[in-house]
Image (spheres, grey):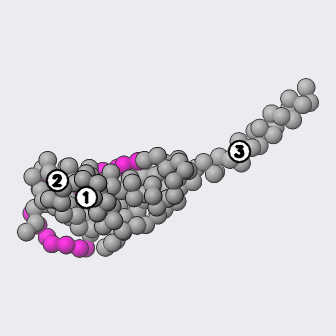
Amino acid sequence: MNVSRTLFGALALSLACSAPALARDTSVYLPLQAAVEAAQAAGKIDGSVKFYLAGTGPKGRVVEAGVVTNRKTNAFGKKDEEACLWVAQSAVIALHEAAKKAGANAVTNIVSYYRKNEYASKTDYECHAGATVAGVALRGDLANVK
């Protein structure tokens, strides 16, 4: 009986100590242009839609404002940068498809929008990398620019 209590106690302690390791949520900031270029190189987007982070690029006629994409990917066994680039490509592809569907040729005013918290940068997006999942949320305006 003492052995089972000791074993149970050790198991409970190990689970309690490992929970914070599984709940890792690291903010990673990387250039959006790298994700756009990777998606284009992979043939997932065709280059007909341009991407402009908030505070950059031309103004245009907004077709649809505040479009949000929230993507996740498996990050198990991957470096944060690798998982973040992969999931950012997925977010870029989703915005590209939304723009084409709306008849827009650009996504402007792009900001990171993870858990509805806005992060604006002229070069970078925000990615959240955990032990098993990485996520990127972007919000932007679908527009026609010259």
Spatial distance from mark 1 to mark 3, Cα to Cα? 44 Å
The residue where tag 1 is placed is 40
Residue 6 painted magenta: no
Residue in the image at 50% along x and 59% along y: 80
Crowding around mark 1 (Cα neighbors within 10 Å: few <14, some 14 to 19, many 20+) is some
Report whether 105 appears left or right of 69: left
User: Mark 2–mark 3 contact, CB under 8 Å?
Assistant: no
* Magenta-colored stretch includes residue 57: yes
Residue sitting at x 46%, y 46%? 74
For badge 3, the amino acid type reads Ala
Q: Main secondary structure of the magenta part?
A: strand
Residue named by callout 2? 99
Q: Earlier in the sequence, mark 1 or mark 3?
A: 3
Quick check: can you spot residue 12? yes
x then y, percent, for residue 120: 34, 68
Kindly identify which numbered label has been placed on residue 67: none
Q: Earlier in the sequence, mark 2 or mark 1?
A: 1
Question: What is the quadrant of residue 107 in the picture?
Answer: bottom left
Residue topped by disc 3: 16
Give the residue type at disc 1: Gln
The image position of residue 102, as x and y in percent, is 12, 50
Residue at the extreme right = 2
Q: Which residue is painted at 71% across and 48% down in the image?
A: 17
Residue 137 image-quadrant placement:
bottom left
| Span colored in magenta | 55-72
Q: Is 117 on the left-hand or right-hand side of 33?
A: right
Image vertical order of residue 6 relative to residue 41, above or below: above
The local crowd at label 3, few if under 14, some if 14 to 19, many if 20 or more residues have their Cα within 10 Å, is few
